[in-house]
Image: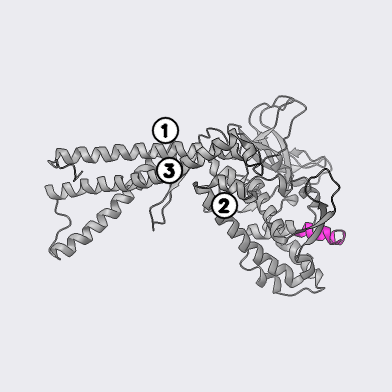
Amino acid sequence: MLHGSKVVTADNIPPHSPVLSCPFSLAITKELSSTALRTWLQRQINSEDPGGWEAATENWTERMFISSYIVAHWLAKDSGLLERSPELRHLPYLETLPPFRLLSTPLTFNDSEMELLKGTSLYGATIDRRNELLDQHQRCQAVFKHYAPDIADGFTLYVSAAASPAPQPLIPVRWTFSERYQTSAIYISSRSFPSILLSPNPSLAPTPASPSHPVLLPLLDSLNHERSTPVTWMVDRMSKSGSPIPEPASDGSPGELAVSIVVGSEVKAGSEVLNNYGPKPNSELILGYGFSLPNNPDDTIVLQLGGSPTKWEIGRKGRPGATDALDGIFQEAFHRLLVAWKVDMREEIGPEWDENHEDEEFEVDMVYMRKDAALMLLNASKSRLGPLLEANERLVSHSRNPATTPSVRVEVPRMLLSYVEGDVAITRDVIEYLEVRLDSAKAELRALGVEDEEDL
């Protein structure tokens, strides 16, 4: 985020110490959100509305429930209903979070900032995400309007007009359900944890046997990210003082279950206490969190053949799995050409053609297809590189002369430049790999006696 906060320890923290804990009862989950929203909205029409809530929210996702629960706090507060809404109990937590104007994911970008994204895959991903949130908010707002139409329409704030030395009148600014829904969605993308942390054996990695969905854990989300920070998680019971304890509380009661983050190494007094969000490329960090890492070793690009459901995530050169992914998309391209070649051969020769018969002509055709697969992917990669280089030049130019576009926030180009530089580097690695593949196929053809350069 552009304007973040941090947690600093006043004392030395020994390794393997729990540093922050969140009771299970404070977690914002889909289940809590659904129950609270149903109770609160049904109160607005003074009816239990049996079965209506379940039918109205049948197709809501976990994120839609949590986002709507967050928005309900703001609507209740501005409508004077919060004191009569005990089920909406997370306002103190929400008021510690940064407002929309201080968030920096691409969902908050103005037109000038979006212009800096053009030519990158993140540009399209941002538009897709905005459209997705627009659809979600419309569906959620329709339910709110059924129960409380006046509240669902939003509210009016009065703020000063544009900065000016002269006194300015107060101008009404309409804050819509859509803007608030978008803010809540950013909170979820940037601050949520997998729900499997709320289990006896907490983990950040869901499995088919233990599926997961996002939950918000107040206070635990206050730690910033550092890729190399060793942390683990534990679930234990809390004493009345709020400290995680391995045994029941002193009065004999079992204590409440809580999830805690545990530092793996010593944290010196005066140092920032950090979390590790896991290996994430800058594209994910920017879209979900609003920051990037310079020279991020976890950067990836995603390649996909047209019409194929398979997405190949390509990492930086030398990273585990990078070559395997490149081999994978190359083999997929080759297989697509092979299938088309077999169809052509059957049509040309007829049913008597034996696809298992291998001779010298067959071998030449196979090499040609490897050459064509490499050439097809190479041309696509070069086409991808051009717009990335243009985006990189725009970002560098703006960084040198920021006054030319004053509406661009100062940290946005810096954040995007780290992302684009990673994309350029990986795309060049892909081009280098494919050029080697192409040269290898050409060498094989020459070894088979194919000397005509036009054929190569």
Q: Which mark is residue 435?
A: none
Sequence-wise first label, 1 or 3: 1
Where's the N terminus, which quadrant?
top right
Q: Is residue 78 magenta?
A: yes
- Foreground residue, 224 or 165? 165
Q: Callout 3: few (<14), some (14-19), or many (20+) C-alpha neighbours within 10 Å?
A: few
> On screen, 220 above or below 228?
below
Q: Nearer the viewer, mark 2 or mark 3?
A: 3
Outermost residue, front side: 166
Q: Which residue is mark 1?
A: 318
Q: Which mark is residue 386?
A: 3
Q: Nearer the viewer, mark 2 or mark 1?
A: 2
User: In what element is the residue under mark 3?
Assistant: helix
The colour scheme is: one colour
Q: Which mark is residue 126?
A: 2
User: In what element is the residue under mark 1?
Assistant: loop
Does residue 60 show up? Answer: yes
Q: Which residue is at 17% across, 55% downward?
A: 356
Q: Position of residue 210 (x, y in %)?
A: 56, 52
Q: Callout 1: few (<14), some (14-19), or many (20+) C-alpha neighbours within 10 Å?
A: few
Sequence-wise first label, 2 or 3: 2
| Three-letter amino acid code of the residue under disc 3 | Gly
Q: Position of residue 13 (x, y in %)?
A: 72, 28
| Three-letter amino acid code of the residue under disc 2 | Thr
Q: Nearer the viewer, mark 1 or mark 3?
A: 3
Q: Which residue is at 66% across, 28% downward?
A: 15
**Which region is colored magenta?**
72-85
